[in-house]
Amino acid sequence: MTTIRDIAKKLNLSISTVSKGLSGASDVSKETRKLVLNTALKMGYVPRRTRPASPVKICVFIENMGYERVEQFGYDIIIGFKLAAATKQWDVSIVPMSLNKSNGIQYEEYMYSNHYAGGFLLGFDLNDDFLRQLKKTTIPTVLLDNVVYNKYVSCLGVDNQEGIFCAVQYLAGLGHKSIAMLNGDPQSWVSAERLSGFRLGMSYYGLTVREELIANGDFTLSDCATKFVSRFIKAGATAIVCASDVLAHGVLCELYRLGLRVPDDMSVVGFDDLPIAAYATPPLTTIRQDRLAIGKNVCLLLEQIMKGNRINRLMLIPELVVRSSTGRPRTREIHLK
């Protein structure tokens, strides 16, 4: 970085003369001041007063989402965001929302009092108070998989509808006609989009959507799959599309407990491509979210909002990853006790 000393050396002037020329002092001639300013411009000098006094501070709020271990959904997103933020020399803070709620802190109050320039929110549901506050905020903010209509707020995520549509398309291509869906929390925007993709895919391929083959669980709890698998089997399902890999893992465990084989007796598809997907028994066919790319793009999107650009939503394209948990529909009847 060019300094006043460098300019003084270049022009063979004293440091004080260069300093006065840059500040427009009256005891320096117009010719000298012009020479100093032109040379400073050519050398890329940035006046100290225009240099950032401190790095831009960004706050990441996380609710209902693991992020500290590599197998957790939020881990790669946070890593991707931090990597991109580091190139911009942003100072990133992570705030678990349970702490914020216990203190009763409001979003804008918290952001302004701690001098944060922007926020990134992960894991929030549609009824969360923070989302309601964002409808009127003037803080540049990015949400993961949620939509709030405010010029200062943008959403980023994968195209959930397309992801589930691709899962149904693949299963229909294998010959499955009776496909079940184990979705996530019914209050979640993601659940609504994935259910929409399921219905769209079933309709497109001429398959009947049966309400007894649709259920809601919890994205993060594999145990909740237990009560739905038998119901799906009794209703004649030959494949189960799950709204998360965690749910799919629970389905695999329950099928194993029932003495059924995957994919011979039941095909299973997940969503996310967490590390557990590749190491499941059998390895899980799933819809991949590039979570590192999500984190990096959140950083780029937040930067654009901070510059005054208005972007409502940015969606990345998910990818079908075929592994051993899917195959052609079974031909034998299954009788559960």
Image: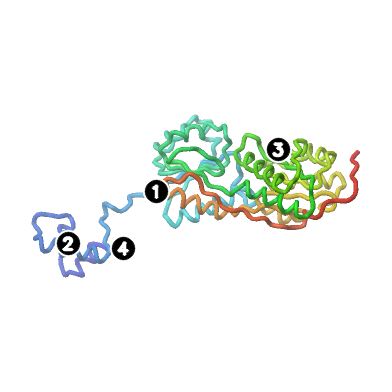
Q: Which residue is mark 1?
A: 56
Report how far apart the C-alphas of labels 1 and 4 lie in the structure.
20 Å
SS type, badge 1: loop
Residue name at image x 69 percent, y 44 percent: 198
| Neighbour tally class for label 1: few under 14, some 14-19, many 20 plus, Cα within 10 Å | some
From the image, tell me which residue sits under label 4.
1
Q: Residues within 10 Å of mark 4 (few under 14, many from 20)?
A: few
* Circle nearer the N terminus (3, 4): 4
Query: Where's residue 278, x and y in %?
Result: 71, 56
Picture layout, residue 135 above or below residue 16:
above
Looking at numbered disc 3 in the image, what kind of residue is underneath it? Gly
Query: At 43% from the left edge and 42% from the top edge, which residue is drawn?
Result: 140
**Circle on res. 217:** 3
Between the C-alphas of marks 3 and 4, the distance is 56 Å
Select label 2 or label 3 by which is in front. Answer: 3
Question: Disc 2 designates what residue?
Answer: 18
**Horizontal side, residue 331 vs residue 218: left or right:** right
* Residue type pointed to by label 1: Val
- 261 relative to 30 in the view: left or right: right
Task: Give the label, 1 or 2, closer to the camera.
Answer: 1
Determine contact: label 3, label 4, CB under 8 Å: no
